[in-house]
Amino acid sequence: MKIVLLGGAGIIGKAIARDLAIFGDVDEITVADLNEEGAREVADAVSGHGTKVTSSRIDVTDRKALVDLIKDADAVINAVQYYFNLDVMRGCLDAGVHYLDLGGLFHTTRKQLELNDEFEKAGITAVLGMGSCPGVANVQTGLLGRMLDRVRSIKIYNGSTPDEEEGLSWAYSIETILDEMTKKPVVFRNGKFVEVEPASEEEFFMFPEPLGYAKTHLSLHSEIATIPLSLKDKGIEEAFFKITFFGYAESAFRKLQFLIEIGMADTEPVEVKGVKVRPRDVLVAVLRRSPETHKKPKSLGFKDIATVAEGEKDGKGVEWRVDTWAWPNDELGISGGTLLVASPPAIVARWLASGKLDMPGVHPPEVAVDPVPFFEELAKRGAKTTITRKEPLEA
């Protein structure tokens, strides 16, 4: 089977490429990126595991070039900035190739769902948001939805050990992090979608050690774009996603928050000495050169994704919780957090390419991905998944 990885020179793209090469089953991998040199470096780095690995430069907004690149592939993993998800999906439609991405930050995901009929008619499958959150959390939700007769609420908590030096380096796209910090989160509350303030409704949540009791807050995320729709027949009334400061130490997060409050993450241009510039472009450029972003992170590299469902089973009120956590993986050379983002798309792309996952249309992971074999595959990479059940004690 052949898989094309778009955005393969990025932080997460590199890790996806390593998983595809090291864990086998893939005959050919094409690592493609606008950064041609970066794509070539990644391809060279993951070669030597019995899989043919090539590299290519690609601008995903060039439809013809994109279709020419992917037309012979069995599946495409889209790891580019989510702004371009619709461009890549339309390229996959033209090429007749299965599609998978890492999320669309709610609003883009909702637009992508509108392509369901076209993918269904073409006989190809698109899986939206197949990283960690969204991704692992959605599959956890799908498992809980199968186990409960009624699901009243789904609460998702994403926790990771922060950089002990409180630096400003980022674990994934800084553009996405800034979007998550500035755009209003959407929650599902009393059966309706509601917008709230960014990084609001702080709550301490008990994660497994070494995280323990950690502060979380709301963020705009794709899980909430699909889960209330997928569990509508289960009577869902509430759903939200919370995270521990996007992997930063709280003090580092507050620094970024201050810069955002004074407008440095704004995307509307301002005029400076006769030149129009976007404040965000200036902020990102300054962050990239800051010594604080180039320090080697001193973190335990541990991450946990916890999904808590409240509902009913056999007429009784119950609360079930699924945790999936990971420590750094030496074979892949990545942290537990990166593993839980990069391995899920590599696993599911294999299923799409081989025909194991055959569900024409556009689907979220809680609908498309079989939970038990998925968590078994993650376990091969060192991730652990547990289920906890709580219910009232009866006399």
Image (tube, grey):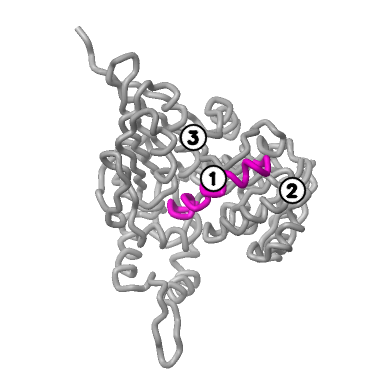
User: How far apart in space, not on screen, are marks 2 and 1 (Cα)?
Assistant: 21 Å
Q: Residue at x 59, y 53 (%)?
A: 79
Magenta span: predominant SS is helix
Q: Quadrant of residue 107?
A: bottom left
Residue 162 position, x and y percent, is 40, 50
Q: Is residue 111 a member of the stretch shown in magenta?
A: yes
Q: In the rendered image, is residue 41 in sight?
A: no
Write down the residue under mark 1: 128
Query: In the rendered view of the protein, which quadrant contains the C terminus?
Result: top left
* Nearer the camera: disc 2 or disc 1: 1
Q: Is residue 45 left or right of residue 107?
A: right
Write down the residue under mark 3: 366
Write down the residue under mark 2: 29
Residue 378 position, x and y percent, is 56, 33
Amino acid type of the residue that numbered disc 2 sits on in the rendered structure: Ile
User: How far apart in space, not on screen, are marks 3 and 2 (Cα)?
Assistant: 27 Å
Classify mark 1: residues with Cα within 10 Å, few (<14), some (14-19) or many (20+): many
Classify mark 3: residues with Cα within 10 Å, few (<14), some (14-19) or many (20+): many
Query: In the rendered view of the protein, which quadrant contains the N terminus?
Result: top right
- Residue 80's disc is none
